[in-house]
Image: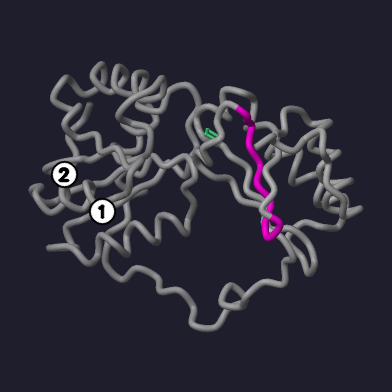
Amino acid sequence: MTATPYARVLFAGPDLAEGSFAELFRRQLVALRGEAALADIVDTSGGHDLLWQQVQASERPLLVIDLDPQSSAQHLDWLRSELSGLQAPEQLFAASLLGQYDADPAGAACALVERTELHLACVDVPQLPEHHSWSCIPPHARRLLLCNGPRCTRRGALPLWKSLREQLKAAGKLECAGGVHITRTQCQFPCDEGPTASLYPEGEWYRIRTAEEVVRLVQERIVEGRQVPELLMKP
Ligand code: FES
């Protein structure tokens, strides 16, 4: 570990408190930065209030490493924008792995700490444009929520997301007028019935286990407009 210009570095992201990812990350981080680094981990699974509190209470200059697996340039803009409202934002910096880490998240995070050229100050954060297509209510007819919570993930939900996008796109129903807006969610609660997919405005709950069942859901429910009783969860 080489010297960096920071008095403190915080590692922030979801699932850093418990579970396999947290166990791996914590073990790797201790190996790289010592036991004391455990105090620099901030789990954001339940929101970011703890992160803001930790930042407020920390010495400056401070670096926040964004470990959110869903991170993106927009997420980093948001994080910087929130940090810019805290005390001494000119001494606050943020950097993101943009969700790009494989089997060595702590190694990737620590490497990013060293790469000061990738750290962004939390001042002069780009504002959202006032007029943009994002500001229009989209013409989707439906919303389909696919659970990527822990238990649905254990039951194979992650690859279903790709299948769902591909099938909807092939059917001309992906996020277009009359089509379906799809969202990955955390736990939707009927975990034992999952992987869970809920469809609105109908309010139907489906159990989708395979790519073949994704094909059926898209073709029969979305394209042909009829329920798929075999895939519906039983009340
Ligand atoms: S984890 Fe998917 S419904 Fe609970």
Q: Can residue 196 be found in the magenta stretch?
A: yes
Quadrant where the N terminus lies? Answer: top left
Secondary structure under the numbered disc 1 in the rendered image = strand
Labels 1 and 2 touching (C-beta < 8 A): yes
Secondary structure under the numbered disc 2 in the rendered image = loop
Whole-percent x, y for residue 136 in the image:
61, 78
> Quarter-wise, where is residue 18 in the image?
top left
- Which residue is rendered at x = 21% and y = 30% of the image? 2
Few, some or many residues within 10 Å of mark 1 (<14, 14–19, 20+): many
For the image, the number of numbered tags is 2
Q: Residue furthest right?
A: 224
Judging by the rendered image, the residue that carries numbered circle 2 is 6
- Which residue is rendered at x = 72% and y = 72% of the image? 139
Q: Seen in the image, is 148 located left or right of residue 22?
A: right
Judging by the rendered image, the residue that carries numbered circle 1 is 93
Taking depth in this image into account, of 74 and 121 the one nearest to the observer is 74
- Which residue is rendered at x = 29% and y = 46% of the image? 116
The amino acid at mark 2 is: Tyr
Magenta stretch, residue numbers: 193-202
Q: Can residue 115 be found in the magenta stretch?
A: no
Whole-percent x, y for residue 43 in the image:
29, 37
- Which residue is rendered at x = 86% and y = 57% of the image? 172
Quadrant where the C terminus lies? Answer: top right
Whole-percent x, y for residue 161 in the image:
68, 39
Say above or below: 62 vs 148. below
For ligand 1, give the image quadrant. Answer: top right
Whole-percent x, y for residue 58 in the image:
10, 47
Q: Seen in the image, is 107 located left or right of residue 156?
A: left
